[in-house]
Each structure stands twice: as C-alpha cells, then as structure tokens.
C-alpha cells in the first residue's frame, strides 16, 4: 500500500511538472499574442487613463476653489461647493486653452515659420560678419571658420520646412497628445475626468475599504501615508514649476523685447517651457536662445542677451523659485541630474519633467526601509547582548 502511494505521488509530481512545462512553453510561444491583447486593452482604456491624468492635474485648482466655497456664508454655495468648484475649474481651463490657441500659439507659430524660412539668410550674414572680423580676433581662427562653413554646407542640404509644414505639425500634435484621437474618445475623456473630480471622495473611500479588506491595517496605513506624501510632492512640484516657468517666460520675453532681440516672444516661450525641466532645461534653452540671437542679431546682442537671461535665471533660482516651491524636495543635485537623464532616456520629455518628484518619493520609501531594517538589527543586537 505504501509503495502504491509512493509511486502515485511520484507520478503526480511528474505530471504536474509536465503540465507546468507545457504551460510555460505555450505562454512563451504565444507571448506576442498576449502582448497584443495587453496593448489593445490599454488602447481601449486610454481615454480613462487620460481622464485620470486630467482629473489629477485639475484637482489642485479644484480643491482650492472648493475650500474657498466652503467658507462662503451662502448655504447653497457651501452645499454645492464641490460641483461649483469643478464647474468653475473646467470653465477656467477652457478659457485658458482658448486664449493660448488664439493669442500665444499664432505668434509663436508665425515666428517659427519666419525663422525657418529666413534661417539660411541669417546664417549667410553670420558667416559674412565672421569673415569681416579683424585678423587678430579670437573668433577668426581656422577651426571656427571650418566649423561654421561645414555647418552651413550641411544646412543647405536640409529642407527644414519639410519638418514644419502644417501636415507635419498636425502629426506632431497627435503624437504628443497621442491618446484621445476620436470624437468619442475626447467626449469620454472629458466626461470621465469631470466624474472623477466630482466622485473622488467616494472612489478613494472605496479603494481604502478594499485595501483594509485585503491587507493588514498597519500596511494600509503605511500605504496611505506614502500616497499622501506622493500627492504632496507631485502637487508642490508640478504647481510650483508651472507658476515659476510662466513667470520666467514673461520676464525673459519683456527683457528681450527691451534689448531688441528678434523673436523675443518665441525665445521667452522656449526658455519658460524648458524651465519646467530641472537643471538641463535652463541650459538647453539659453543655448538655443544664444544661437538664434547670434544668427539674427549678431555677436554683441547675443552676449547682452546671454548676460541678461543668466542674471534673470540666477534671480529665479535663488529668490523666486524657493519662494514659490516653499520647501525643498531635499534631494541632491547629482540625484536630480541622474533622475532627469534616466527619465528622459526612457520616457522622453514627460519623463524628464516627472523624474524628480518620482525619485523623491522613491528615495523617501528607500530611506524608510533602510531605517526600519536598521532598527530591527539594533533590536536583534540588543537581544543577543542580553
């Protein structure tokens, strides 16, 4: 009887192992199909993911407006504070988008087209000015002259307008937005984002109840603390960076206009936009602005512009930005540079923008884990000593 049971258990073991191997083989053999299924699923729910992102971004102004309404003396306003705040936030967002589309974007797009159309002429003037410099000038040496001429020859071979025609720009916009392409998807995205803002309390409450049903209470509380910290870090970073970038863009545009820099609005927009990306953004934007000003306005104007913009950015970095951010994210500059590089490498511009708050949260979790493990070891050492 024992031998029969032993043989039966052995055969069961081999049978289960064979089934497991077949399942693994089938999974690997059909991994492309599984990948397609997952990809199609995410394509289907993309409007809801976009709605979640929109609701997350609009939560900042909506919650602040709601708090103001709750302090109102009117009972109706107090009772309908959330609905009114969401409605007002949506209206303000639509107004801002309309203003951007009708006021700022036409000026910027016209400047881009004009710059691209006339760039070859600007470059030829720059080469002529370089050739007319005195022989003892530091800029007039063989390496610089050859580099300028080589760049000019390559520039002639490139038709820059093919990358900036209306069809291409439409394609760029679709690629950048990339999620709600159809009218139905747009409608679903807008409606879902409004409902997410209105029902956020119920949704979060349900998630919390589900968490307590599945996990231990102390684990749920810890996860809740991390979620609160993550929200605070992201909200503080996103809101402060947006406000700071808008201020920098406006101030730089005014300063460039006073100096007489051509395409001042375009360059101010570029510097403000790139200012969203820590460290690298400001360096890249100033470099682009100096190059464009050098070509369109000459060396002296480029130097004046560079000095003014660098001074303004130092004022922003040391006075304006700390006032807006309030408290630092408390991570080293090296970690910021590393996170921006990795985020940009894997997720592009959006990754560069979100890398810093993401790494800040990860560092917080890692620090807590290290402290927890060290406390456990200290307790273990104390027990061993006793």
Image: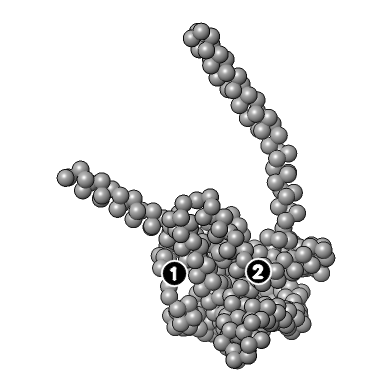
The image quarter containing residue 60 is bottom right
Write down the residue under mark 1.
329
Label 2 residue SS: loop
For the residues labelled 2 and 1, say whether their Cβ atoms are less than 8 Å apart. no
For residue 267, above or below residue 332: below
Res. 180 in view: yes
Residue drawn at (74%, 69%), measured in percent from left and top? 190
Q: Between 297 and 92, which is closer to the camera in this rendering?
A: 92
Q: Position of residue 153 (x, y in %)?
A: 69, 64
Q: CA distance from mark 2 to mark 1?
A: 30 Å
Q: Residue at x 52, y 12 (%)?
A: 5
Task: Classify 10 Å Cα crowding around label 1: few (below 14), some (14-19), many (20 and above).
Answer: some
Q: How many labels, in total?
A: 2
Q: Nearer the viewer, residue 14 or 316?
A: 14
Q: How is the image coloured?
A: one colour
Front label number (2 vs 1): 2
Q: Please report whichever mark, 2 or 1, sits nearer to the chain's N-terminal start.
A: 2
In the displayed structure, does residue 358 sit left or right of residue 43? Answer: left
- Tag 1 secondary structure: loop
Measured as percent of width and height from the top left, residue 312 is found at 50, 83
Q: Residue at x 70, y 40 (%)?
A: 34
Location of the C terminus by quadrant is top left
The part of the image, by quadrant, that contains residue 191 is: bottom right
Q: Residue 16 at x, y = what percent?
A: 59, 23
Residue wearing tag 2: 199
Which residue is drawn at the image coordinates 49% and 61% (left, top)? 224
- Label 2 crowd bin: few (<14), some (14–19), many (20+), radius 10 Å: some
Which x, y percent locates residue 121?
A: 73, 76
């Amino acid at each position: 009887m024992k031998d029969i049971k032993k043989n039966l258990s052995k055969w069961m073991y081999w049978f289960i192992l064979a089934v497991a191997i077949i399942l693994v083989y089938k999974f690997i053999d059909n991994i492309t199909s599984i990948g397609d299924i997952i990809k199609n699923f995410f394509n289907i729910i993309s409007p809801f993911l976009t709605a979640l992102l929109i609701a997350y971004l609009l939560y900042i102004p909506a919650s602040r407006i709601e708090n103001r309404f709750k302090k109102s003396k009117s009972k109706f306003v107090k009772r309908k504070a959330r609905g009114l705040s969401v409605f007002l936030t949506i209206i303000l967002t639509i107004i801002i988008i309309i203003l951007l589309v009708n006021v700022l974007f036409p000026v910027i797009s016209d400047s881009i087209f004009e710059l691209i159309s006339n760039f070859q002429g600007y470059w030829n003037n720059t080469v002529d000015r370089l050739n007319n410099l005195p022989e003892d000038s530091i800029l007039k040496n063989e390496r610089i002259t050859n580099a300028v001429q080589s760049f000019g020859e390559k520039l002639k071979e490139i038709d820059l307008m093919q990358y900036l025609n209306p069809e291409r720009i439409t394609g760029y916009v679709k690629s950048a937005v990339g999620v709600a392409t159809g009218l139905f998807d747009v409608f679903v995205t807008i409606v879902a984002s409004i409902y997410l803002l209105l029902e956020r309390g119920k949704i979060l409450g349900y998630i919390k109840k589900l968490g307590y049903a599945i996990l231990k209470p102390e684990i749920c509380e810890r996860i809740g603390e991390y979620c609160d910290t993550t929200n605070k870090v992201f909200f503080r970073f996103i809101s402060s960076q947006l406000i700071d970038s808008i201020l920098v863009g406006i101030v730089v545009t005014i300063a460039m206009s006073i100096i007489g820099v051509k395409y001042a609005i375009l360059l101010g927009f570029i510097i403000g936009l790139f200012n969203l990306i820590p460290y690298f953004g400001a360096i890249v934007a100033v470099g682009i602005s100096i190059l464009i000003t050098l070509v369109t306005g000459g060396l002296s104007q480029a130097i004046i512009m560079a000095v003014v913009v660098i001074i303004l950015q130092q004022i922003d970095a040391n006075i304006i930005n700390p006032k807006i951010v309030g408290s630092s994210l408390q991570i080293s500059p090296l970690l910021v540079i590393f996170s921006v590089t990795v985020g940009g490498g894997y997720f592009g511009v959006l990754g560069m923008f979100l890398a810093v708050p993401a790494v800040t949260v990860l560092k917080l979790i890692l620090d807590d884990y290290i402290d927890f493990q060290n406390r456990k070891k200290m307790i273990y050492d104390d027990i061993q000593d006793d």
